[in-house]
Image (spheres, rainbow, N blue to C red):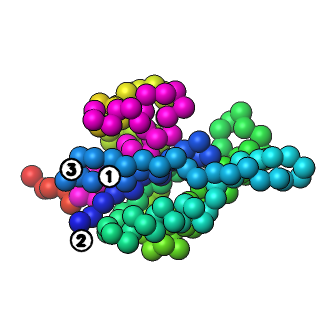
């Protein structure tokens, strides 16, 4: 069974990507979210069972290693928004553990440095389109930055899992 690599951008507008280093192809799924009535208001939340179904499906046919973006709340976010984001990260890592997929977490500054991407969401989308030209349409819209993050995280998952060569 060939090993494949998963990248997860855990935001509500994030995504999950599956990278095959042999074919240089990427498969991307938007983060499964649904609207729930919470305190009388509709709020989007990650649907853990659907995320589990996606990851379990990939894991049934491939040995996987995942990299999850480790981010804290943004300075301008409310406490409630930061809590929701943290809960989303916890759902992603919990589902990975439940499915039995080994994973690592990495800060954006670290993984972005590894793929030498410039600053900003447009730079990330441009880099993903450059790395996967046959699938560049996945990253063409401004709102596709979560897909681009996930794709590049999957590539970094591959890079970090390779043995280092001593010269």
Q: Is residue 90 magenta?
A: no
- The residue lying at 54 percent from left, 44 percent from top is 14
Viewer-side residue, 6 vs 69: 6
Q: Residues within 10 Å of mark 2 (few under 14, many from 20)?
A: few
- The residue lying at 37 percent from left, 43 percent from top is 152
**Magenta residues (range):** 133-162
Image quarter where the N terminus lies is bottom left
Residue lying at the far right in this picture: please name it: 40
Majority SS type along the magenta span: helix
Q: Which residue is disc 3 drawn over?
A: 23
Q: Is residue 151 magenta?
A: yes
- The residue lying at 30 percent from left, 60 percent from top is 4
Where residue 105 appears, x then y in whole percent?
47, 56
Q: Is residue 84 visible?
A: yes
- Position of 30 compared to 67: left or right? right
- The residue lying at 27 percent from left, 64 percent from top is 3
Where residue 154 appears, x then y in whole percent?
37, 50
Distance from disc 1 to disc 2, alpha carbons, whole Å, reads 14 Å
Q: Which residue is disc 2 drawn over?
A: 1
Q: Which residue is disc 1 drawn over?
A: 19
- Position of 63 compared to 21: left or right? right
Q: Residues within 10 Å of mark 3 (few under 14, many from 20)?
A: few
Residue 5 sits above or below residue 78 on the image: below
Where residue 48 appears, x then y in whole percent?
61, 63
Q: Residues within 10 Å of mark 1 (few under 14, many from 20)?
A: many
Viewer-side residue, 153 vs 104: 153
- Position of 120 compared to 48: left or right? left
Q: Is residue 156 visible?
A: no
Which badge, 3 or 2, comes first in the chain's sequence?
A: 2
């Amino acid at each position: 069974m060939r090993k494949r690599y998963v990248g997860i951008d855990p935001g509500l507008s994030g995504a999950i990507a599956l990278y095959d280093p042999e074919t240089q192809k990427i498969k991307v799924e938007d983060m499964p979210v649904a609207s729930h009535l919470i305190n009388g208001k509709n709020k989007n939340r990650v649907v853990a069972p659907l995320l589990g179904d996606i990851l379990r499906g990939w894991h049934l046919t491939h040995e996987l290693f995942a990299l999850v973006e480790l981010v804290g709340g943004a300075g301008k976010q409310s406490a409630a928004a930061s809590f929701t984001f943290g809960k989303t990260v916890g759902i992603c890592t919990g589902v990975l553990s439940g499915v039995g997929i080994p994973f690592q977490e990495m800060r954006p500054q670290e993984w972005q440095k590894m793929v030498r991407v410039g600053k900003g969401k447009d730079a990330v989308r441009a880099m993903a389109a450059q790395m996967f030209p046959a699938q560049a349409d996945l990253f063409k819209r401004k709102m596709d930055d979560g897909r681009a993050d996930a794709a590049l995280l999957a590539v970094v998952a591959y890079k970090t899992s390779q043995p280092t060569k001593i010269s």
